[in-house]
């Protein structure tokens, strides 16, 4: 499996870089053999080319200290790139958490806004029946640190998880 990792910032000093962290996550999850190529979308504004996109099985988005709704060049470019990938490579899997989830939602026509409160620490998600089926569990607790959220479901997507603070914690869009 070939994965393009869209790196949306850096982890704090003293921690490994996102490529190292995601490589360890995938390895420790006993994922199938994989190649993970990192693209710095903030400073280098580097993205896979159209030709490269055809060689990837998935795009993964990292988290970020930035706000996904900020009107800055690198975020606007990331949203536009994501929208183009959705249109031109609809079978390519897009996998994201937090900031990346918000970027994908924006690319699909939804909004990302500041929430009325933070979600910090281990958080119990309410899973939809679809999510329970996909994850083979009735409950899921995840580590969170965010205040921004996607307040409504993007068009042509299905909800997977919610919390009382963030009604759209996760969504999925299936390729026909």
Image (cartoon, rainbow, N blue to C red):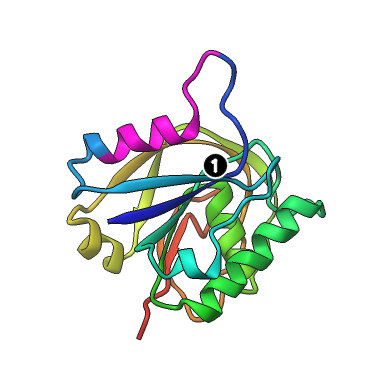
Q: Can the viewer see residue 6?
A: yes
Number of numbered discs: 1
Mark 1, other Cα within 10 Å: few <14 / some 14–19 / many ≥20? many
Q: Nearer the viewer, residue 25 or 169?
A: 25
Q: Does the magenta stretch mainly form a helix, a strand or a loop?
A: helix
Position of residue 127 measured from the top left corner of the image (x, y, whole percent): 33, 57
Position of residue 142 measured from the top left corner of the image (x, y, whole percent): 38, 39
Q: Nearer the viewer, residue 36 or 94?
A: 36
- Residue at (49%, 18%) from the top-left corner? 15
The quadrant in which the C terminus is found is bottom left
Farthest-out residue, bottom = 176
Q: Quadrant of residue 27?
A: top left
Q: Tell me: 47 left or right of 23.
A: right
Position of residue 108 measured from the top left corner of the image (x, y, whole percent): 59, 73
Magenta span includes 60: no
Magenta range: 14-26
The quadrant in which the N terminus is found is bottom left
In this picture, is 8 found above or below 87? above
In this picture, is 33 found above or below 167? above
In this picture, is 13 found above or below 63? above
- Residue at (27%, 48%) from the top-left corner? 34
Q: Can the viewer see residue 166?
A: no
Q: Circle 1 sits in a helix, a strand or a loop, which is it?
A: loop
- Residue at (62%, 69%) from the top-left corner? 107
Q: Quadrant of residue 87?
A: bottom right
Please name the residue that numbered disc 1 is placed on: 63
Farthest-out residue, front = 51
- Residue at (65%, 74%) from the top-left corner? 109
Position of residue 110 measured from the top left corner of the image (x, y, whole percent): 64, 70
């Amino acid at each position: 499996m070939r994965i393009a990792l869209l790196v949306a910032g850096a982890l704090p000093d003293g921690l490994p870089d996102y490529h190292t962290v995601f490589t360890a996550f995938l390895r420790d999850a006993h994922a199938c053999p994989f190649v993970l190529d990192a693209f710095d979308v903030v400073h280098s504004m580097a993205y896979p080319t159209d030709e490269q996109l055809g060689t990837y099985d998935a795009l993964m988005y990292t988290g970020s200290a930035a706000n996904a709704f900020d009107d800055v060049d690198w975020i606007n470019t990331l949203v536009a790139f994501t929208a183009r990938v959705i249109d031109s490579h609809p079978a390519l899997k897009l996998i994201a958490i937090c900031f990346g989830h918000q970027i994908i939602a924006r690319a699909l026509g939804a909004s990302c806004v500041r929430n009325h409160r933070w979600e910090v620490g281990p958080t119990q998600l309410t899973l939809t029946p679809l999510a329970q089926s996909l994850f083979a569990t009735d409950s899921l607790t995840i580590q969170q640190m965010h205040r921004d959220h996607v307040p409504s479901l993007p068009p042509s997507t299905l909800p997977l998880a919610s919390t009382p603070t963030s009604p759209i914690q996760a969504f999925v869009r299936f390729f026909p």
